[in-house]
Amino acid sequence: MPIGSYNTIIEPFRIHSTQRIPFPNAEERRIAMEKAGWNLFGLRGEDVIIDLLTDSGTGAMSARQWAGMLDGDESYAGSRSFFRLADVIRDITGLPEVIPTHQGRAAERILFSAVGKSGQVIPNNTHFDTTRANVEYTGAEALDFVIPEGRQPQLIHPFKGNMDIERLEAKVRELGRDRVPLIMVTVTNNSGGGQPVSMANIKAVRAVCDRYDIPLFLDACRFAENSWFIKLREPGYEDKSPLEIAREMFSYADGCTMSAKKDGMVNIGGFLAMKDPALAMECRNLLILTEGFPTYGGLAGYDMEAMATGLMEALDPNYLQYRIRSTAYLADKAVAAGVPIVQPPGGHAVYLDAAQLLPHIPARQLPAQALAVALYLEGGVRGVEIGSLMFGRDLPDGGFQPAAMELVRLAIPRRTYTQSHVDFVGEVITRVAAKAHDLRGFEVVEQAPWLRHFTAKLAPL
Ligand code: F0G
């Protein structure tokens, strides 16, 4: 019997080395939370039992990646490890120009420094925070064109990350190609709940790009997970391998930015890849300024070895089946506990809907933060608030503009936690949900002028 025909999706790996999980008790967790100013970013890793803050750079590497690291070539110029990495990236993406960077945002900064300026507009399905910030830093404007279904948490749709082609094209027509240096598609759409984009939609964006002669770039962080969703949900792709699907996705693109901390399966690394040799030369010159020589770009040779191996491991069907199924498994636990989530669950994370669970806490009192803190106090589980602490704004007239949604993201590190860890998280969610009506909100007592959620200090109400 094929392994995929069983109901139990087993982890497609044996554990080869382990790391101790600390078990701070309830009193120790309360003290840690108080010391952190009730901000989960202020906790130490050692204070946390199950860390679901992010799936970025927090996964486990395989024995083959570690073995490759011993064989990394640390030549400053012309490292063998760079050429191996570039070959793997070309094999998957078909993009000839490969520029290594230390992580995704470095690729973004370089790309937008080369193409962005005041008066220009960069459309995307939904810009991730760092992408938006790097676009805006150049003076250009970052606009989101995700389909309306992508903004409704409870609505089920197979490809909620899709671009709204009509609205995109209307904007491009209005601005003209000189004001749109490139169009981006983020796969999967992290800020919209880790939702996938269909191949048909990528092709339709490509057609808009062709009509106006504008390049298409993918924000490819979770390209392998997106490929798997296409295989599962889009007619015509059920018999194709994730690698074949990924190759087709990239065949419509002129370039990509990548944080290999996601589907590169590494703890640090990224790249920029493209077709245009003139743009690549400009990007390499910027790379040398702050990241390093073009054959290492701020990485060690061993990092590039680990990335070359990890990019292919992320496309292994057994891995992807386990990955997407285990995220859905956590989603099932949350739903069984009576906690509403963004539906359907995304590839890398489950998003709990705090606005629905805690209707007695107004947005200004940060319901999603109340839920995130409760999960930590109850069982040492760390998620991240994606609500009014992150996106809410105090208005000059004393009013408050809340975020569009009040969510807690539980992101799943790759190949790191077992099914019993997830069962434990499910129990923690169940216990918190049972006392939801007792939870209280928070007020902000200290905050930075931007990106306040990282460093704000709070007080319970
Ligand atoms: N694009 C997307 C879609 C991302 O999710 C991230 C990072 C980046 C770009 C930036 O990459 O961190 O390597 O510089 N997302 C992480 C997260 C931080 O937790 O979702 P980076």
Image (tube, grey):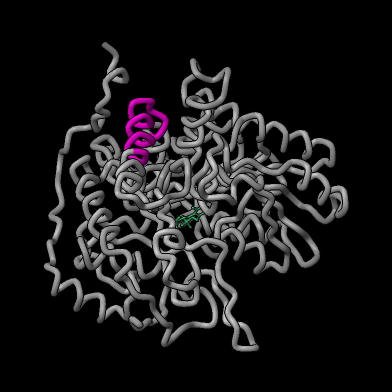
| Main secondary-structure element of the magenta-colored stretch | helix
Number of numbered discs overlaid on the protein picture: 0
Determine which quarter of the picture holds residue 133: bottom right
As rendered, which of 184 and 138 lies closer to the eye?
Answer: 184
Q: Residue at 13% of width from left, 61% of height from top?
A: 22
Image location (x, y in percent) of residue 158: 54, 34
* Near-viewer residue (157 or 107): 157
What is the quadrant of residue 381 in the picture? bottom left
Report whether 292 appears left or right of 324.
Answer: right
Start-end of magenta stretch: 314-328
Say if 255 sits above or below 2 in the image: below
Residue lying at 55% horizontally and 67% vertically, measured from the top left: 403
Look at the image and say whether residue 322 sits in the magenta stretch. Answer: yes
Q: Position of residue 461 (x, y in %)?
A: 35, 82
Place of residue 248 in the rendered image (x, y in percent of width and height, measured from the top left): 59, 26
**Name of the residue lying farthest toward the top:** 1
